[in-house]
Image (spheres, rainbow, N blue to C red):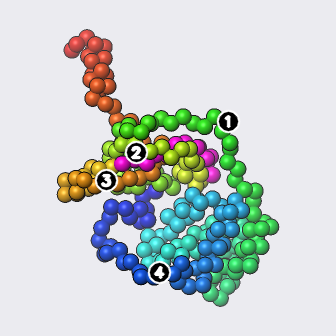
Amino acid sequence: MNGVHDMGGMDGFGPVVHEQNEPVFHAGWEGRVYAIASIAVGRGLINADEFRHAIERIPPARYLASSYYERWIAAVETLLVERRVVTRKELLAKEDGAIDPALIANAVATQGPAPIKVKTEKRPPRARFAKGARVRARNLNPSGHTRLPRYVRGKAGVIARDWGVFVFPDTNAHHAGTKPQHCYSVAFDARELWGKAANSREQVYLDLWEDYLEPIASSSKRQATRRQTERRSGGR
């Protein structure tokens, strides 16, 4: 989805601040949020893709004003309420508005729905693209979850590596099937993405699922297609 979370290639947000000796967690509650989310995903109560989509659904102003784990707790609350593990009333009943870890851990262990099963394909899907193939990222603007960044849509690149078959996040996030398919590392020239002002020797590598890509015909194929079209039209 085209939300505020898709910030790749955007500017105007100031420099990236690197924290020296950064701890894993800045506060104890962050560790508890991490544990709750891990338990929920690990037990199949929610999946990682719908968790990401829940973060994407945070209103833009709140998203930008929130820290990393504040977004996590917002997503966890959203999903656990939607999955009826807890209610909004139970959340609001807490003085500090936080989820009781013991309550959630117990609910996840005893009340969660059956895990989402991933179908095992007898024959894994064949790869549509080979290493070195020229491809173009499709210009998609889905309203739901996607791992296709905006800044690469419509841009041409080259298949650098086939990582194998993975669950398709765009459907898995919405419980619309796992739709397993190949995921590729695709190399994009910096100038293709950012224009002539970019360094001509730099490239950006992105891991993109097959449904995000379309082939770019070689010049010989384009010429063959043009000749075929001319023959069909009688040379007119």
Q: Is residue 96 above or below residue 138?
A: below
Q: Is residue 122 above or below residue 153?
A: above
Q: Residues within 10 Å of mark 3 (few under 14, many from 20)?
A: some
Q: Which residues are magenta?
A: 175-187
Question: In the rendered image, which residue does mark 3 sit on?
Answer: 203
Q: Is residue 171 left or right of residue 217?
A: right
Residues marked 3 and 1 touching at CB (< 8 Å):
no
Q: Which residue appears farthest toward the top when viewing the image?
A: 234
Q: Which residue appears farthest toward the bottom when viewing the image?
A: 95
**Mark 2 / mark 1, whichever is N-terminal:** 1
Q: Residue at x 32, y 25 (%)?
A: 221
Q: Which residue appears farthest toward the right when viewing the image?
A: 110
Which mark is nearer the camera, 2 or 1? 2
Question: In the rendered image, which residue does mark 4 sit on?
Answer: 22
- Could you tell me how far apart the alpha carbons at marks 1 and 4 are, in whole angstroms? 45 Å
Q: Is residue 66 above or below residue 179?
A: below
Secondary structure beneath label 1: loop
Q: Residue at x 71, y 62 (%)?
A: 43
The residue type indicated by label 2 comes to Ala
Location of residue 146 in the rendering, given as x and y in whole percent from the top left corner: 48, 54
Q: Is residue 87 above or below residue 56?
A: below
Location of residue 148 in the rendering, given as x and y in whole percent from the top left corner: 44, 52
Q: Is residue 174 left or right of residue 94?
A: left
Q: Residues within 10 Å of mark 4 (few under 14, many from 20)?
A: few
**Mark 2 / mark 4, whichever is N-terminal:** 4
